[in-house]
Amino acid sequence: MLGRQDQSFTCFCKTNLDFHEESEFKHHIIVCPKFQKNSPITQFFNNINFHQRNLEELYIIKYELELKLEEVNTYIEVQKCEEGKPADHNSSKQDDLIPCSACNTFKDFSDIIFLESCDHTFCHTCLSKYILKSVMDHKDATCFTCNSRIPEYQKKSILGEEEYHKMMDEVSFSGLQRTTCVKCSNTFVFEPGNVQGNLKDDMGKLINKDKELHYVQNRFKCPNCQTEQCKKCQTTPYHLGKTCEENQKIKESKLCKYCEEPIEKLASGMIDVCNKSECVQKTKNACLTILKCDHSCSGFYGEKNCLPCLHQECSKKIAPTLNGQTGDDYCTICGVERLINAPCIRSSCGHIFHVECITKRILTKWHRPRIVFNFCFCPLCKKWMDFPPESSLHQKIKIYTKLFQDIKTKSLERLKYEKRDKDERLLTRGDPYYQKPAEYAMAIYSYYECFKCKKTIFWWTQKM
């Protein structure tokens, strides 16, 4: 690498340098591009890629380099002696020093350790670094010379009680997967789960085994701040049913607002819906208006007043006007799809539902022969629902409102006829029916719908 001429060395750039001028020599090594390019030692260190190493590996590299540097210094002193030049240590005192079997340098007796298993001698610096490296590599620390095992109690004596226990804690922790929360920077042990074969995505569909394996190996919830995230790509929340690569592709793509898959081809007349058959079917009930925010309306076909925008970035800004609901909330009735994933309608109470879901709920009516009106009440606030006049649901609710009033009137008349309008439950404070004769009458009297003429018929009295 270097050509030696008396007290000087010739660099690859042909510059002569005095190797005794340490600061000048170091400066030249740093600034000389030819030295950096051609020196095999420099290339070796560049290939180590220090910036890609973790803390444990960097400590090990540091200790190894320090050991090698001590070895190089020893050889420098030896060659100085061979050339008749004074060594750095005082030769008159060398007889009082003891050589270290690892670095071959002479050390003061106070710095030398005798191994109890074999009586070989090592300096404290070499032995402590070697023990640390061995333990971090999960290997037994043995004598450099005869490979006899260093006892655990002597390791503790060499390192010191505090350093020894700190090292053992780090070793125990290093054998596990350590994870850092992207939100609060809390570091803790991550324990992967096992594939069960029953994990479902947000749509209720079973996830294949490869993606479930990704889930159990990467999904976690921080024990400190409870943030759900992916250990591999650090996405929050975890991208259930998708690998990190698929999730990144989806982030970079324009998604269909119904199926939330990348759009390959748009449905006719739509700006954010793909041409899959199930998505196209949903557009038949959808409002086609483009809102001021440039998002498509999430309301129903034919509505006169559009719903507020349900897209994530818009709905969160106006959440109070939506009773706290956003497009990311699941429909209360189906509980399977988010509100944004299908055309929606707003009830008179202010709550929003999928048009298809609320329509099915109202058409199904009561599930048993006895007429009840639970399906007409909002599942969230329990208020009687009504819908915009231009919707078909308004006409259906109007029919059941009339039926409700009819049964309510008949029930109150029967209550008075049977002289039960003074029942104890109506007069007892704290009773659910206290001073509520209409509710009490409809609870104790059962009415049914004639399958032939569709008229309401009183059938029997409930025991209360």
Image: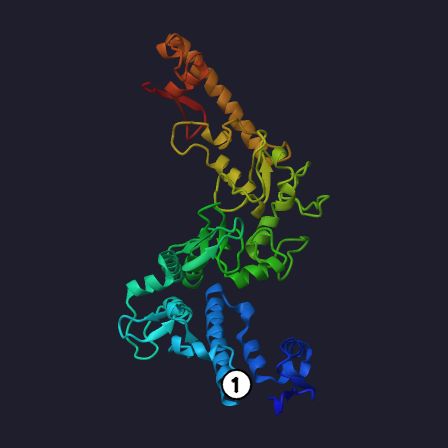
The spot of residue 75 in percent (x, y) is 48, 83
- Say which quadrant the N terminus sits in: bottom right
Tag 1: residue type?
Answer: Lys
Which residue is at a point 64% across and 87% down the rendered structure image? 8
Task: Report the residue marked by disc 1.
Answer: 80
Identify which residue is drawn at 52% across, 51% down. 185
Horizontal side of 287 relative to 352 (left or right) equals: right
Looking at the rendering, which quadrant does residue 217 occupy? Answer: bottom left
Q: Where, quadrant-wise, is the C terminus in this rendering?
A: top left
- Is residue 340 or residue 74 the one in the foreground? 74
Is 283 drawn above or below residue 79 in the view shown?
A: above
Which structural element holds mark 1?
helix
Q: Residue furthest left?
A: 117
Instruction: Determine whether 283 is above or below 410 in the image.
Output: below
Give the x, y percent position of residue 242: 50, 59
- Dot 1: within a 10 Å radius of its alpha carbon, few (fewer than 14), some, or many (20 or more) residues? some
* Residue 192 visible in the shown view: no
Residue 279 visible, this orientation: yes
224 up-or-down from 389: above or below: below
**Count of numbered labels shown in the rendering:** 1
Vertically, is 43 above or below 208?
A: below
Taking the spot 37% from the left edge, 73% from the top edge, the residue there is: 122
110 vs 4, nearest the viewer: 110
What scheme was used to colour the molecule?
A: rainbow
Could you say which is closer to the camera, residue 244 or residue 345? Answer: 244
Q: Nearer the viewer, residue 116 or 171?
A: 116
Residue that sits furthest to the right in the current view:
292
Residue at 56 percent across and 27 percent down: it is 398
In percent of width and height, residue 117 lies at 26, 72
User: Residue 92 location in percent, x, y?
Assistant: 45, 78
